[in-house]
Image (cartoon, rainbow, N blue to C red):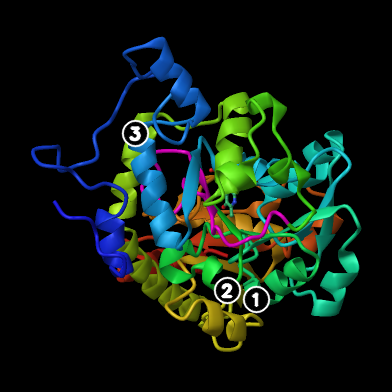
Amino acid sequence: MKELKADAKIETKCLHAGYTPKNGEPRVVPIVQSTTYVYDSTNDVADVFDDPTKSLIYSRFENPTTDAVEKKIAALEGGVAAMCTSSGQAATLCSILNICECGDSFIASSAIYGGTINLFAVTFKKLGIECIFVDANATEEDLNAAFKPNTKAVFGETIANPAVNVLDIELWAKAAHAHGVPLIVDNTFATPILCRPIEWGADIVIHSTSKYMDGHAVQVGGVIVDSGKFDWTNGNFPSMTEPDESYHGTVYTEKYSFAPYIVKARMQLMRDFGCYPAANSSFLLNLGLETLAIRMKQYCENGLTVAKFLKSSDKVESVTYAALEDDKCHKLAEKYLPLGVSGVISFAVKGGRPAAIRFMDSLTLASNEVHVADIRTCVLHPASATHRQLTDEQLVAAGIDGGMIRLSVGLENIDDILDDVRQALDKI
Ligand SMILES: *Cc1c(COP(=O)(O)O)cnc(C)c1O
């Protein structure tokens, strides 16, 4: 089989990027269920340690099945390299820890996933890393004012979970670059089918692959993609440009100038934390990725139909879905998400928390579960689940109120989804 042409369209990359079987090899990416890899001599093993990017050492940080998926996701996002992780949380953790140390700070949009807020505000604080939260709709001036001399990164979500705000990626990238630091974008809900943040100036893209990428709710995983575009030699990142004593003096920006960020994340953080996915999980993720393009189009179509229906109901207080023309993020969605804004809708019913609970408990097709961006329609009440640990103030900052429901529209027939939503609204 021939190499995939570099300008292949994204639907084609979903199926073919990352793995090119040679004469007589398996058509499908094989599951390499092995912790370790064999060499002929002590010298061969020493060589692998000298340049771990040349061959495989140990499945705590690299594996051929996962490698194929990493290459596919890097191709989909337009990056130069990627590293899979055992969860989206691990991807977020490593994306920051790869550049921030005790005594550093970074900036994050306040409209982000609840688990990420916890990691940033509570756990990183214990590690001596400060997260400076900034309003998701901050102006350039607000953003610039948030930087401190020790600020090393900026973080936001393309489509925020669960507030479904759209991030002004170009603006946030501009502010980050003006201060010599990278923009990290969590692109979980948009996926590279709807938005490729690197094209808008993001330097690092991360995902919870547990959501649309896998799509079938069969594996928890994450990924970090390196655009290869950020200049780590600008003086702000000595851990990239000075010898790493824990890796026999490697200078990442010199030895691995094609993707120093990802090589460092793998050789330092993944080596030490070991939060790498199992080969079998990567195999399942790859199956999901194969149909990602076609699924995303249908999620967007079903999502828009349901959002319009909710908007027309007198039981509904408000609907947040950036594809709706009067949504506060509609302009941003037109720019960054021209194909659609996924199947995730945030809406509030009239009557607050009790009415929201009544609605959710009346659904018969949509399931009540702690998941989102799945192939099956599902609902969640963020204030009593994923965001339960947040204070009222943090809830407001994250764009969540007691009556708010996160509805993740799946791929069932649209008439069945609408029937279910209609009958549950009638029960309020
Ligand atoms: C779910 C989610 C995460 C965390 O991912 P896990 O795979 O559950 O660890 C991070 N960011 C976003 C936007 C998410 O939706």
Q: Quadrant of residue 252?
A: top right
The earlier-in-sequence mark between 1 and 2 is 1
Magenta portion: prevailing SS class: loop
Which residue does the numbered mark 2 point to in the structure image?
A: 200
The earlier-in-sequence mark between 1 and 3 is 3
Q: Whole-percent x and y of residue 201?
A: 61, 70
| Nearer to me, 231 or 189 | 231
Which residue does the numbered mark 3 point to in the structure image?
A: 64
Q: Amino acid at mark 3?
A: Pro
Q: Is residue 279 left or right of residue 317?
A: left
* Boundaries of the magenta span: 207-233
Mark 1 lies on a secondary structure that is helix
Q: Whole-percent x and y of residue 144?
A: 85, 71
* C-alpha separation, residue under disc 1 versus residue under disc 3: 35 Å
Mark 2 lies on a secondary structure that is helix
* C-alpha separation, residue under disc 2 versus residue under disc 3: 31 Å
Counting labels gives: 3
Residue under the image location 61 percent in, 65 percent down:
202
Label 1 crowding class (10 Å Cα cut-off): few <14, some 14-19, many 20+? some
| Nearer to me, 87 or 353 | 87
Cβ atoms at labels 2 and 3 below 8 Å apart: no
Does the segment drawn in magenta span residue 215? yes
Q: Amino acid at mark 2?
A: Trp
Which residue does the numbered mark 1 point to in the structure image?
A: 170
Residue under the image location 87 percent in, 38 percent down:
128
Does the segment drawn in magenta span residue 136? no
Instruction: Work out whether residue 124 can be spotted.
Output: yes
Q: Whole-percent x and y of residue 106?
A: 80, 53
